[in-house]
Image (tube, rainbow, N blue to C red):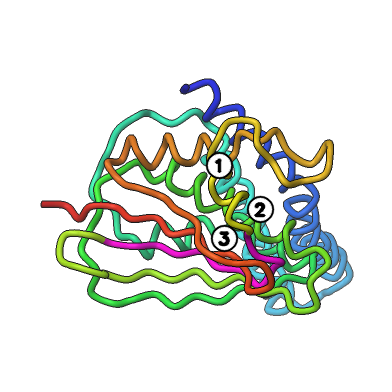
Amino acid sequence: NAQLVQSEKLSAVGELAASVAHEVKNPMVGIVGFAQLGQESTDPAEILEYFKLIEQDAFRANKILQNLLEFSRPPEMEFEALAPNDVVMGAMALCVHQLQMQGVRTETALATGLSSIRGNSNQLRQVLLNLMLNAGQAMEGSPKKLITVSTSRPEPGFVEIKVGDTGPGLADDVKDKLFKPFFTTKRRGQGTGLGLSVSRSIIEAHRGSIRAEGAPGVGATFIIRLPEVS
């Protein structure tokens, strides 16, 4: 199971590769440009300003790569108290640019004052990343491409994270099979059919549940329910 989780994670990293390369390229262009301007300048104050701009872009590129490396690394299976909104924002930071490249907009509706959940941040981010990348692919032919991620406390003792899209939706027979290993609605070569199965195993290891809602023509919503820290 651990090997499957890591395999699916590296599959997601492969999907993000073009996005990460693009994101790192932007600050690198700035670094090269400001370095060239600094070499041409004779004003010490101006040169110092260029150094500051170079430093800012270098930190930006490093943060992008650090996020990816932390996500790629096999996690230590330690559970800790986590803020649900922080988990959501950490996952979105990894894939928002990839989704933008596909013409997909993202919105959040994060509740305030949520209790902590107990879990492994790396694995929960993997689940959310999988759901968002799946949603982006599902909306490939949709006129409106929007992913909404929300958090709430539906009842005492539980926190819910929802990932909704404006894609083609889900038929009842598909919903029954979604979390089965090797079942996929993607075109050949676009997925292993293990992403949702692995996601369910991760959520169940967190003493939670995951389900799908939606109907043809009205998009799909995946709902993760996790217990609060008692």
Q: Distance between the residues labelled 3 and 1?
A: 21 Å
Residue 205: assigned label: none
Q: Which of marks 2 and 3 is nearer the N terminus?
A: 3
Judging from the image, what secondary structure is the residue with disc 2 in? helix
Q: In this view, does 104 lie to the left or right of 73?
A: right
Q: Find residue 61 and report its image quarter.
A: bottom right
Q: In this view, does 162 lie to the left or right of 188?
A: left
Q: Position of residue 8 (x, y in %)?
A: 61, 33
Residues at badges 1 and 2 in contact (C-beta under 8 Å)? Answer: yes
Q: Find residue 32 and report its image quarter.
A: bottom right
Residue at screen point 38% across, 28% down: 76
Q: Position of residue 94 (x, y in %)?
A: 60, 55
Which of 98 and 58 lies nearest the eye of the viewer?
98
Q: How far apart are marks 1 and 2 (CA)?
A: 9 Å
Foreground: disc 3 or disc 1: 1
Q: How far apart are marks 2 and 3 (CA)?
A: 16 Å
Residue bearing the label numbered 2: 134
Q: Which stretch did the figure color magenta? A: 159-170
Does the magenta-highlighted stretch encompass residue 160?
Answer: yes
Residue bearing the label numbered 3: 93
Name the amino acid, label 2.
Asn
Residue at screen point 66% across, 41% down: 12
Judging from the image, what secondary structure is the residue with disc 3 in? helix
Foreground: disc 2 or disc 3: 2
Which of 25 and 149 lies nearest the eye of the viewer?
149
